[in-house]
Image (cartoon, rainbow, N blue to C red):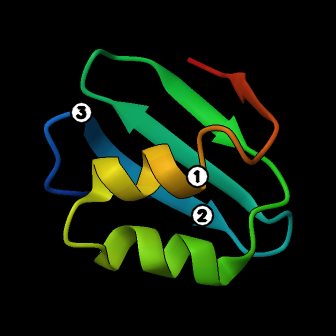
């Protein structure tokens, strides 16, 4: 999955697959996680948020099932 770099003190890059509704987050610490059944609007709001890390913490982290992939 292609990811785009974001400006964040915790997140390095973010990617999204529309077909599977999978959100992929690469953290600056090196971990890569996939979050499942994430609506596209959540992805769009995440990458355009004034604080990507805060949006992720409030709207994604505790809301969607995930697994570590890297």
Mark closer to the observer (1, 3)? 3
Q: Mark 3 points at which residue?
A: 10
The residue sitting at 26% across, 40% down in the picture is 12
Mark sitting earlier along the chain (2/3):
3
Confirm or deny contact between disc 1 and disc 2 (CB under 8 A). yes
Q: Name the residue under label 1.
A: 1
The foreground one among 55 and 8 is 55
Q: Name the residue under label 2.
A: 16
Q: Judge the density around disc 3: few (<14), some (14-19), many (≥20) Cα neighbours within 10 Å.
A: some
In the rendered image, the vertical position of residue 7 relative to residue 11, given as above or below: below
Q: SS at mark 1?
A: loop
Mark closer to the observer (2, 3)? 3
Q: SS at mark 3?
A: loop
Give x and y (percent) for residue 51.
22, 61
**Quarter-wise, where is residue 11 in the image?**
top left
The residue sitting at 75% across, 63% down in the picture is 38
In the rendered image, the vertical position of residue 44 relative to residue 61, given as above or below: below
In the rendered image, the vertical position of residue 33 relative to residue 53, given as above or below: above
Give x and y (percent) for residue 34.
67, 38
- Rounded to the nearest angstrom, the CA distance separating label 2 from label 3 is 18 Å
Mark sitting earlier along the chain (1/3):
1
- Rounded to the nearest angstrom, the CA distance separating label 1 from label 3 is 20 Å
- Rounded to the nearest angstrom, the CA distance separating label 1 from label 2 is 7 Å
The foreground one among 27 and 61 is 61
The residue sitting at 65% across, 22% down in the picture is 69
Give x and y (percent) for residue 53.
31, 47
């Amino acid at each position: 999955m292609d990811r785009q770099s974001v400006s964040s003190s915790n997140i390095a890059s973010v990617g999204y697959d529309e077909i599977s509704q999978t959100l992929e987050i690469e953290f600056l610490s090196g971990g890569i996680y996939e979050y499942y059944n994430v609506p596209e609007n959540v992805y769009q709001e995440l990458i355009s948020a004034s604080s990507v890390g805060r949006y992720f913490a409030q709207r994604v982290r505790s809301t969607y099932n995930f697994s570590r992939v890297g």
